Structure formats: C-alpha cells, structure tokens
Amino acid sequence: MSDLIFSINITMPIFLVMVIGWTLRRIGMLSGEFVTVANRFNFAVTLPVLLFRDISSVDIRTVFDLKFVLFCALSSTVCFWTIWGLTRLFLKDRTMRGAFVQASFRSSVAVMGMAFINNVYGTSAMGPLMIVGAVPLYNIFSVIVLTFEADGSGERETGKIKEACVNILKNPIIIAILLGLLAALLRVDFPVLVDKTIGSVAQLATPLALIGLGAGFEGRKALAKIRPTLWASAIKLVIQPLVFVPIAAWMGFTGEKMIAILIMLAAPATPSCYIMAKNMRNDGVLTASIVVMTTLLAAFTLTGWIYLLKVSGLI
C-alpha cells in the first residue's frame, strides 16, 4: 500500500494540473491561442532550459558509465524502430502513425522520471546520465517519425530526409542537451545570478507543459481514438519494461541504475510529445490522449514494477 501511495503522490498531482488546464479552457479563461503560444514557448525555451540544467549540474566525468549509457541508448533505439515498423504494418490510418510511435516509446524522464528517482534515492547522478543516453535519441527519433509521418506528406515525397536532418539540427531540446553535456564535461561553474535565472525558467517547464496539454485536450475526439490510445499505453507501461528490464537485470544493473532504466522504459509518455506533435503537423488529439492515459495508469503499473524489483532484490 505504501508503494501505491508513493506512486499516486507522484502521478496524480501531474494529472490534476492537466485537469486544471482543461477546466480553465472550458470556462473560457484560456484560449486556443494561449495553448498554441504556450506550446511553442515550452518547446523553444522552458523544456530545453530544464534539460540543460539537469545535465550541466552533473559531474559527468566522475559518474560516467559507458555500459549503462549504451544500454539506455540501444534499448531506446530498438524500441523506436520496432514500434515504428509494427505501426506501419498494423495501423492503417497514416495520420495517427507519428503520434502513436512517438508517445509509445518516449518517456517523461525529465518531467516525471527525475521526481521518481529522487524520491527513491535522493539526489542521483544516474537520472541525468540516463537522460544523456536516451533523451537525445528520443528527440532525434521523434523528429524523424514526425517528419516522415506528418500530415500532408506523401509516401514518395522527396526531401524528407533533408527536412528531418534540418529539424534535428534545429531542435532546441537536442541543442540544449548537447550544451548541457558540454558544460558538464568542462565543469562550468555558473555565477549564482545565472544559476538562479536558469532555475527559474526551468521551473516553468513542467506546470506550463501540463496546463497547455490539459487546455488543449479534446475529450470527445480522444474517445474516438481510444483503441490506439490503449495499445500505446500498453506498449509504454508494460511491454517495453517486460522485454528490457530482465535484460538489464541479466547485465548486472541494480539500485539507482535499475530505477533509472525502469523510468526510461515504463514512465508515462512525456508532455513534450504533445508539444512536438502539434508543432510538426501530427495528431495532437491522439498524443494528448496517450499522455493522459499513461499518466493515470502509471501510478499502478510503476508501483507493480517497483514492487517486483524490490522482491527480486534489484533495488
């Protein structure tokens, strides 16, 4: 019961902030224009600053573990290409594919994952190290699938590879991760004034992303897409960890590293999925539906996974 309460205390406040955004939109306090501007602002400013802060604050040289980073990178890569391949085979509605793939493999490691890791172990270096291994690939792969499956793109449309490369190079989240990694490697010590400014902007990322997601959520349209939502939720919360957690255990990962791997595989879909889908002409309704559903269910699925890891002596 304590594990369930612990998980609910992490996931339910996030869900309730989405509800606040939805309610404010329904009563007319927030407009569609606000949602659009907030999503762009989050994508270009607050989420990149949040990731830069988390990565740049870690002593990468001291805690770096190549085996762990490679596992995070390779498992994320396998998940993405497998899900995209199966989606192209079984999901006939092409307009949903990009949103489905992105939300099925991409976890909320920065927004929600770090909260889980810190609550279990306190300040942990493995969370940011997992971000280094997985989040750049999350964004690169998301840009690729959202570019190739964007609304209005034809199967044989030329220039998509070039467009995807340009989108990757311009992606502010990827740029922020690389800058954060560089700052960590160089052990840059920012003045207090700069640190506090970065911290203030970073603190805006999670609540603003959740308010925007809730305000943009369209319940009736989402109900029409409940089947792909449930499939994506099952992949995100159950199937991915079911496949890769045993492999991680076989490779000898335990403690903080195992918790970080679990969060990477089994955390809810990140709100930035919705922001990127909306900004890249993909299905925002399906994306929001998957984010909301996985956030609701994660309190129970993550509790189950944590319990199994504890019983197995892996954490």
Image: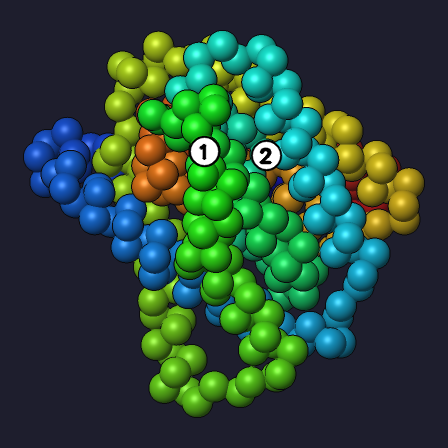
Residue 284: x and y in percent read: 34, 30
Residue type at mark 2?
Phe
* Left or right of 98 in this view: 38: left
Residue 116 visible to an observer of this rendering: no
Write down the quadrant of residue 203 in the picture: bottom left
Residue found at x 40% / y 71%: 199
Q: List the residue tagged with mark 2.
A: 105
Residue found at x 48% / y 64%: 176
Residue 313: x and y in percent read: 86, 43
Write down the quadrant of residue 273 in the picture: top left
**Hey, which residue is sitting farthest left in the picture?**
28
Write down the quadrant of residue 211 in the picture: top left
Labelled disc at residue 10? none
- The foreground one among 315 and 254 is 254
Residue 266 visible to an observer of this rendering: yes
* Left or right of 118 in this view: 8: left
Residue type at mark 1?
Thr
Residue 139: x and y in percent read: 52, 47
Q: Residues within 10 Å of mark 1 (few under 14, many from 20)?
A: few
* Left or right of 184 in this view: 275: left
- The foreground one among 8 and 125 is 125
Q: Nearer the viewer, mark 2 or mark 1?
A: 1
Residue 2: x and y in percent read: 62, 39
Labelled disc at residue 158? 1
The quadrant of the picture occupied by the N terminus is top right
**Label 1: element kind:** loop
